[in-house]
Amino acid sequence: MNTDKQQPDVLQQIVDAVHQRHGYDVLALDMTEYPLTMDIFLLTSADNRIQSRAIADHVERTARNLGWRLHHKEGYSEGSWILLDFIDLVVHIFLPDVRKYYNIESLWSDAPVMKFEDKLTIEDNEDFTFEIAPSD
C-alpha cells in the first residue's frame, strides 16, 4: 500500500482483526499492477451473517485506530458479502457460498497472492480438555 499511513504491519493488524472474529481463508491480492484505485484486496470468509458483520465492525474499528478512514461500505445490512473500502485497501467478507459463486480469486488469478494461515481454534487443539464436575 502506498500511503502516508503505511506501517510495515498494517496489513497483518487488519488480518489479526479478521482472525479475532473468527474469519478464515484469508487472502490478500496485490492489485498494484492493475489500473485500479486500491493496492490490496483482502478476502475472508465467515460462517454466518452475524459473524460477517462482527468481522466488518472489528476491521473498521481496527483500521480507524490505525489512522485509516472508511471511504465506503456495502452489503452490511444483508451480510452475505460485505465490502469495506479504505481506498488503498478493500476488504471483502463473504459467506462461503457467495465467495464461491463470485470467485474473485479466479477473476484476479494473475495477481500476486498472500495467503494467511487460519488461527487455531479450540476444536483444532488436541491438547485442550474440558471436564465438568457435578455440583454437590
Image: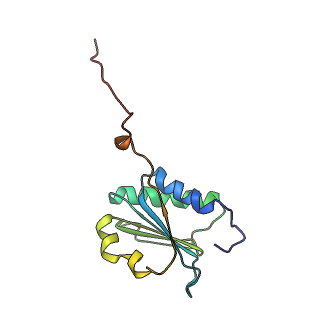
- Coordinates of residue 32 in the picture (x, y in percent): 59, 80
- Coordinates of residue 52 in the picture (x, y in percent): 39, 60
Image quarter of residue 9: bottom right
Residue under the image location 40 percent in, 45 percent down: 121
Left or right: where does residue 5 sit relative to residue 119?
Answer: right
- Coordinates of residue 10 in the picture (x, y in percent): 62, 61
Outermost residue, right side: 4
Image quarter of residue 136: top left
Residue under the image location 58 percent in, 58 percent down: 12
Q: Nearer the viewer, residue 56 or 104?
A: 104
Give the number of callouts: 0
- Coordinates of residue 36 in the picture (x, y in percent): 55, 85
Residue under the image location 31 percent in, 71 percent down: 100
Q: Nearer the viewer, residue 88 or 107?
A: 107
In this rendering, the answer to whether 131 lies above or below 117 is above
Residue under the image location 34 percent in, 67 percent down: 80
Outermost residue, top side: 136
Image quarter of residue 97: bottom left
Q: The N terminus appears in which quarter of the rendering?
A: bottom right
Scheme of image coloration: rainbow
